[in-house]
Image (spheres, rainbow, N blue to C red):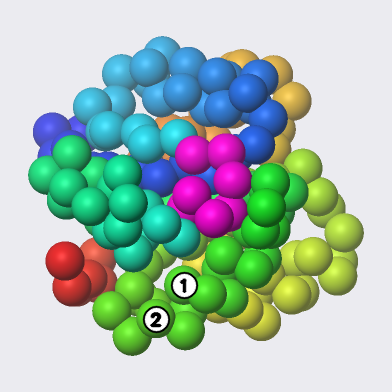
Amino acid sequence: MSLTKFTILVAEDDPNDAFFIQRAFQKTQLVHTLKVLEDGDAVIDYLSGIGEYADREQYPLPTLILLDIKLLRRSGLEVLEWIRQQPHLKRLLVIMLTSSDQDSDINLAYELGANSYLTKPIGIDNLQEMVNSINQYWLLLNKQPEIEQ
C-alpha cells in the first residue's frame, strides 16, 4: 500500500463506471483522494480553480487525471487538448480511461498529449488490477513533473 496520498481527478460521465472506479480504489486500499466529475466543463473549471473549485485546499491540482472520452458538455479529448495548451498544466499526467478501442480515438488521444490510453476492463477484479497497476507505475515508480499550483 502506498503511504503517499495523491489527488486523482476522475472524469467520468457514467455513474456506474465512476462508482466501480471508486470501489476499485477502496478495495485495493489505496489512500489517494479521488475527485469525480462528470462533465468536461467541470474538469476545466476544477483545473482552472474557478467557481466552486477556487479553494485549492479542498480542490488541489491532481497528480493524475483519469479521463473518459465521452463526457457531457465537452469531450475528454477536448479537455485533453485544453490541458496541453495551458502552460501551468501541460505537464499533468493524463491517462485516457475509456471504453473506446477505436484506433482513431487512440491515435488522436496520443496526438493531443495523453500519457497513456487504457480501455475500461470488464469486471471489478480486472478493474482493481488495473488500478493497482496505475498506482504502481504512475504514482509510485514514475517521477512526477512539477505542476504550478
Where residue 76 appears, as percent x and y from the top left, is: 64, 58
Residue located beneath label 2 in the image = 86
Where residue 97 appears, as percent x and y from the top left, is: 62, 47
> Does the image show residue 118?
no
Number of residues whose C-alpha sits closer than 10 Å to that of mark 1, classed few (under 14), some (14–19) or many (20 or more): many
Residue 50 as seen in the image, left or right of residue 17: left
> Does the image show residue 144?
yes
Residue 111 as seen in the image, left or right of residue 26: right
Note whether 4 is above or below 110 in the view shown: above
Task: Find the magenta span and give its range.
Answer: 37-43
Residue located beneath label 1 in the image = 83
Residue 116 as seen in the image, left or right of residue 72: left
Residue pictured at 24% horizontal, 65% vertical = 144
Q: Is residue 139 magenta?
A: no
Which one is in front, 115 or 18? 18
Where residue 42 appears, as percent x and y from the top left, is: 48, 49
Q: Are marks 2 and 1 in contact (CB under 8 Å)?
A: yes
Where residue 34 appears, as percent x and y from the top left, is: 35, 33
Number of residues whose C-alpha sits closer than 10 Å to that of mark 2, classed few (under 14), some (14–19) or many (20 or more): few
Residue pictured at 66% horizontal, 65% vertical = 77
Which one is in front, 67 or 79? 79
Label 2, secondary structure: give it. loop
Residue 30 as seen in the image, left or right of residue 9: left
* Residue furthest front in the image: 51
Label 1, secondary structure: give it. helix
Q: Amino acid at mark 1?
A: Ile
Q: Amino acid at mark 2?
A: Gln
Which one is in front, 106 or 40? 40
